[in-house]
Image (cartoon, helix red, strand yellow):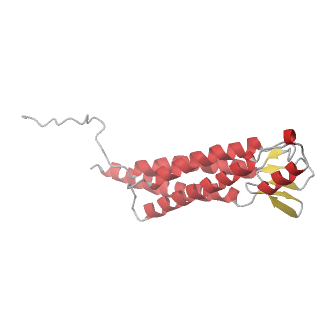
């Protein structure tokens, strides 16, 4: 094989390892209790994936929905969609970060798991599901509970997801089996 191609493969693997580890940190960090939705200016309140905080007090999002619905009529009650979407986002983010970190860590030892499912594939699926559930989380927060803006953790999380998607694909490609791009799968043995 060509020496330049070997050097390029080594560089691709190094880059993919680092990108996967950085993405794992960027995906997991915003999920650790930071407020994804912040209250309007001057108010010290916000909503994280699992908790709603106001000043020094915090309550789980599921309890906030229950407390809110206690004092409302049947027709005015809200759904807890955002609370369940926040839990799903956290769940899929932990899976994605774990798969990215494991794939990047194994790649530092020049190992790549292909069977039964590559870790990069698990990371890609979990990242896609977590991004969708994260957007549902923000979109489903009722204005009665919190009206405000999206906080910096969501944007950091989005950057982490995009980085993770790129890193998982880079790592999968760097450790893929090399095939001739012009091979059509037919046996073309001369003289046969």
The x and y percentages for residue 86 are: 70, 51
The x and y percentages for residue 152 are: 75, 50
* Residue 169 is at least partly visible in this image: yes
Give the residue at x 39% y 62%: 110
Give the residue at x 84% y 58%: 53
Quarter-of-image position of residue 25? bottom right
Question: In this picture, is 127 found above or below 105?
Answer: above
Front-most of residues 135 and 67: 67
Give the residue at x 42% y 53%: 117
In the image, farthest residue toward the front: 74
The x and y percentages for residue 150 are: 78, 46
| In the image: residue 34, left or right of residue 28 | right
Front-most of residues 97 and 49: 49
The x and y percentages for residue 153 are: 73, 52
| In the image: residue 182, left or right of residue 174 | left
Question: In this picture, is 23 found above or below 108?
Answer: above
Give the residue at x 10% y 35%: 190
Front-most of residues 191 and 80: 80
């Amino acid at each position: 094989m060509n020496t330049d191609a070997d050097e390029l493969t080594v560089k691709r693997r190094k880059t993919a390892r680092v990108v996967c580890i950085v993405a794992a940190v960027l995906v997991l960090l915003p999920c650790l209790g930071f407020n994804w939705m912040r209250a309007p200016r001057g108010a010290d309140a916000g909503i994280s994936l699992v908790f709603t905080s106001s000043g020094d007090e915090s309550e789980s999002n599921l309890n906030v929905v229950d407390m809110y619905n206690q004092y409302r009529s049947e027709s005015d009650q809200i759904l807890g969609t955002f609370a369940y979407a926040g839990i799903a986002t956290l769940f899929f983010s932990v899976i994605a970060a774990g798969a990215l970190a494991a794939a990047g860590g194994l790649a530092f030892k020049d190992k790549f798991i292909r069977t039964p499912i590559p870790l990069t594939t698990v990371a890609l699926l979990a990242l896609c599901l977590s991004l969708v559930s994260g957007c549902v989380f923000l979109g489903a927060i009722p204005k009665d509970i919190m009206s405000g803006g999206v906080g910096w953790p969501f944007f950091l999380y989005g950057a982490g997801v995009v980085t993770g998607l790129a890193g998982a694909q880079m790592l999968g490609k760097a450790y893929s089996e090399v095939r001739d791009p012009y091979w059509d799968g037919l046996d073309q043995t001369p003289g046969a």
